[in-house]
Every structure is written in C-alpha cells, then in structure tokens.
Amino acid sequence: MGRVVTIENRAAQKILTANRLVKNYGGLRILREVSLSISAGERVALVGPSGCGKTTLLNCLGGIDRADAGTIFFCDDEISKLSSDALAALRRERIGTIFQFFHLLPTLTAFENVELPLQLLEVPLRERRERVIKLLERVKLSHRANAFPGQLSGGEMQRVAIARSLANRPVLLLADEPTGNLDSANGENILSLLAEVSDESQVALLMVTHSVEAARVCHRVLQMCDGAIMDETRTA
C-alpha cells in the first residue's frame, strides 16, 4: 500500500464547504443536516454502511442533485443557488468524477475517452492532444492509447477514467468506490495513483469507499450512519 502523505504543505484554501445539508426522497430523510469541508490537496474518505447516504451526499456536493435545505460553497460560489446550466458548467470546468464502473464510452478509444471532456470545453485541438498525451503518460497507458475499453483490463479502464477526470484540470475530484470493481493489486495501484495526483496537483479528493485500504491513503475519514456524519478520524 502506498504511504500516507501528510498535508502540512498543502494550500489552505477551502475548496468545498457544506453546511447542514438535508435531502429527502419519497418522504424518507436521506441526509440529516450534514456539514463538512475539504481543502486544496486534502484527501477525505467517506465511509459507512450501504444506504447511509454517502452517494446521495456526493451527488449533492457535485451539483448532480440538489439538497432540500442547507448550503454548499464551492470556492467562492454558493452552488445551491446556481442554475442548472451554471451547475453543469461548474462540473465540466472544475470538478472531476471517478466511478466504480468506469463509465467509459465503449465506441471511443482510451485517447478519445480522455479527450472528450476537452472537446466539450472547446479546448483547441493542439492543446487538448498535448494534454491527453501527458495524462496517458501520467497513468502509464501511452501504449494503450488506441485501445477500446473492451480491450482493456479493469485496472487499465480505471486509469483511463482517472486520466479523463483530470483532463479539465479540476480543483475537486469526487470518487465513488473507485476500487470497488478491482482486485486488490489493481485497487492498490489506483489508490497510490490518486494519492500521487492529489499531492502533485493539490486537487482535493473526496472518496466514497467501503475499503479500509482506500481510507488509509486519505488525511481524514468521515463515518456516516443513517444520513449523518457520526465521527471523524484524522489519519495524518
């Protein structure tokens, strides 16, 4: 397992601050006045039993869903007040997302999957090609640039997904069980890569996980139960 890196030298800027978030579905309260914050370069693990609200919280923080009450500040923007179009632009430009099941487009090569977010941002051709090449080099997949997802292993697909999540140079990475569909060896490699990337670029990482090993590469662990954060442990 990769070492846990301390955060003494990271930037102090608060990237995300949530205050007393409430979310209901069908009369059931899923989030119960959840508050948290995360700073640049910090890695935070969100753990807890299935159904406790972890993914719902991640979706609210990433602007995919809206909380019914409470506030969310992303840097200087109160995203709870942004329009749907403004939220979509924020996600495209400043947030990277990593999923358990990769969510790569099967008809695009690894190179094209990483390039897609830059096309949506209308980044000029030369710049986006240079950026994709560097990202594939960073995740050690230059030799698989022309492979389609169906030709890649699970670990390779997740590394492509990480490269894609970094293409827009985000300040926040949201990861939902990024090692949940991988064997232990590939999972360890992905965790080491995420830790290295956050240290290098000072991107903040909020990771939903059931994995004890995944939590160990984070600076803080937040324990959720029944829609609320019940405990916080600092690991570094």
Image (cartoon, rainbow, N blue to C red):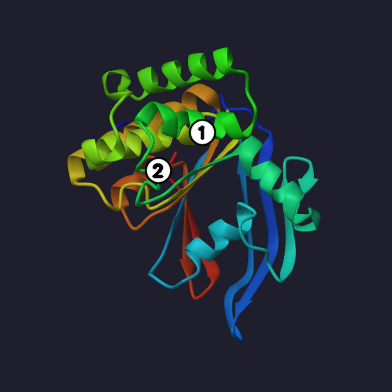
Does residue 71 appear to the left or right of 133 in the view shown? right
The amino acid type found where label 2 is placed reads Leu
Name the residue beneath numbered marker 1: 116
Relative depth, front residue between 21 and 165:
165
Q: Position of residue 75 (x, y in %)?
A: 73, 40
Element at label 2: loop
Q: Return the mark for residue 105.
A: 2
> What residue is at 35 percent from the left and 25 percent from the top?
139
Q: Give how far apart the Cα atoms at labels 1 and 2 are.
A: 10 Å
Q: Position of residue 204 (x, y in %)?
A: 55, 37
Q: Position of residue 44 (x, y in %)?
A: 49, 46
Q: Position of residue 135 (x, y in %)?
A: 43, 22
Q: Quadrant of residue 1?
A: top left
Does residue 117 appear to the left or right of 163 in the view shown? right
> What residue is at 78 percent from the left and 45 percent from the top?
77
CB atoms of marks 1 and 2 within 8 Å: yes
Q: Is residue 41 visible from the viewing direction of this image?
A: no
Does residue 33 appear to the left or right of 56 in the view shown? right
The amino acid type found where label 1 is placed reads Leu
Q: Quadrant of residue 148?
A: top left
